Image: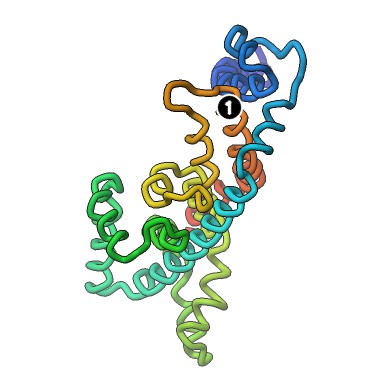
Amino acid sequence: MTKKHLRWIPDLCMAPACVVMLLPFYYIVVNTFKSASEASQHPLALPTRVSFENYRYVFDRVPLLQSFSNTVFITVASVLIIVLIGSMAAYPIVFNRGKLYKVLMFYLLCGFLIPFQSTLIPLFELMKNLGFINKIYGLIILYSSGCVFSFFLVSGYMRTIPKELEEAATIDGCSVWGIFWKIILPLLKPITITAVIFQTMWIWNDFLTPMLFLNSRSKGTLVLEIYRARGQFSVDWTLFLTLTVLVLLPILIFFIIMQKHIVKGMVGGALKG
């Protein structure tokens, strides 16, 4: 057996795993084109007649446009804050390696290690006292805590940037802000895009935080609309699956377009080092 034939062995081994991974997606999508009775009787079969009635019903009865605009606004605003604060915090800590900055980094690490679920009760009390419950801007402020993740992601990449660039810019009379915005931040483009991808997928798909801190439907997100598809005693599975497809489709397209930047950002620092 030649080397050319041996190359196909990993692909053949991965094919069954790929089928298993794609099966849930097939199940979700194919049942959105069926009636409720057909979906319950033959869940894995192709539809006898392709029907868009479920999608028509969802667009007529569910405030998708409002939920979509809320989700986009919350995601975009939160990600911008997360990336900017994370990058700005990493800059002085990485380029000024004194004891104080090491203490600050350890402090941020401790906060990063605390599970979000363990702080829900005091966090809810804090948000209520500040008047941030059922406020979109309150949720954005809450999501801005993701800047700690962005900080650690960016700081590892930032250490590969030669310190001589900062020193040369300082000699030329460039201010600290000028060095960061004109020199450091453009060099962080690969890892910044990676941080944007991770944070966008987290915020877009998050269910727990909007459910706890947003009460009114007019301010809800797309994921909450999936949750509302269930009734008190039963679940309309065709409606549930149709909403799931509509919610996952934008973030799936986003991930497919941006996935090449994930690898580029994660290995860029290693290649430069």
Image: 241 above or below 184: above
Q: Is residue 272 left or right of residue 254?
A: left
Percent across and percent down for residue 190 are 56, 58
Q: Residue 183, located in which quarter of the rendered image? A: bottom right
Which image quarter holds the N terminus? top right
Q: Amino acid at mark 1?
A: Leu
- For disc 1, the neighbor class at 10 Å (few under 14, some 14 to 19, many from 20) is many
Image: 25 above or below 246: above
Percent across and percent down for residue 107 are 24, 62
Q: Residue 23, located in which quarter of the rendered image? A: top right
Q: Nearer the viewer, residue 32 or 112?
A: 32
Q: Furthest residue to the top?
A: 41
Which residue is drawn at the image coordinates 24% and 46% (left, top)?
118
Looking at the rendered structure, the secondary structure element under dot 1 is helix
Image: 191 above or below 233: below
Q: Nearer the viewer, residue 210 or 98?
A: 210
Which residue is drawn at the image coordinates 47% and 59% (left, top)?
136
Which residue is drawn at the image coordinates 71% and 32% (left, top)?
56
Percent across and percent down for residue 83 are 48, 63
Percent across and percent down for residue 242 are 62, 29
Whether residue 145 is visible, yes or no, is no
Residue under label 1, please give it: 241
Q: Nearer the viewer, residue 244 or 134?
A: 134
Which residue is drawn at the image coordinates 23% and 54% (left, top)?
122
Image: 99 above or below 196: below
Q: Residue 30, located in which quarter of the rendered image? A: top right
Q: Nearer the viewer, residue 144 or 197?
A: 144
Whether residue 173 is visible, yes or no, is yes
What is the number of callouts on the image? 1
